[in-house]
Amino acid sequence: MTAAAAALLLVYLAVVAARGLWANLAFTPLETEVSFWGRAGYMPGAATRSRVDRGIAQLLSEAPENPYYHALRAAQLAWEGYWSGAPEEREALAGRMLEAQYRALELRPADRAGWVKLVEYASMAGAGADLQAQAGRQLAALDRVREHASGGGDARLDPDSGQ
């Protein structure tokens, strides 16, 4: 490899690392803020909620395949729905909340805590039994894999499939 090619590779790697660092620096305060919502009655003001909404939208626009950003969006929408006074708005937010959490799980299907959260959100939103049943099946499959990893059980995600 020539010195010029090595320098170019080094610059490329630095840019990639800087982009990831920026995303982490942007994500962490947003996640921290949302994690405090509802604690001891804390309800952020409109400016804070708007800033969080814009920040999450920015992260998702730059990294739409990041499951953590979708899960954060779901948590934010859950609180927005909780605080909403209008039933129509609450219903719309609940639908978006479920979509965001489900997208996070499509990107990271082995996230057991995420599936538990989906069941919680589905219950809050009054979602259909189909979604709750799907989440229950996924949780059971993850439990089977965990049991197998600890020395017992059938590791297949669907033991009835024969695969």
Image (cartoon, helix red, strand yellow):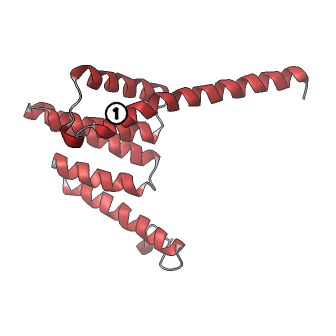
Q: Position of residue 120 (x, y in %)?
A: 25, 53
95 horizontally vs 136: left or right: left
Q: Position of residue 42 (x, y in %)?
A: 21, 35
- In the picture of the structure, the residue carrying the numbered disc 1 is 33
**Residue 127 seen anywhere in this rendered image of the structure:** no
Residue sitting at x 42%, y 23%: 58
Pointer 1 local density, CA inside 10 Å: few below 14, some 14–19, many at least 20 = some
Look at the image and tell me in which quarter the N terminus lies.
top right
Q: Residue furthest right?
A: 2
Identify which residue is drawn at 33% across, 26% down.
52
> Is 64 situated left or right of 89 in this image?
right
Left or right of residue 99, residue 154 in this image: right
Q: Is residue 10 visible?
A: yes
SS assignment at label 1: helix
Q: Is residue 42 above or below residue 161?
A: above
Residue 115 lies in quadrant:
bottom left
**What residue sits 41% from the left and 68% below the top?**
143
Percent position (x, y) of residue 34? 32, 36
Residue appearing at x 50%, y 29% in the figure: 25
Kindly give the residue lying farthest to the front in the view shown: 40
Which residue type does callout 1 highlight? Glu
The image quadrant of residue 53 is top left
Q: How many marks?
A: 1
Give the left or right position of residue 86, taking residue 109 as reference.
left
Q: Nearer the viewer, residue 113 or 109?
A: 113
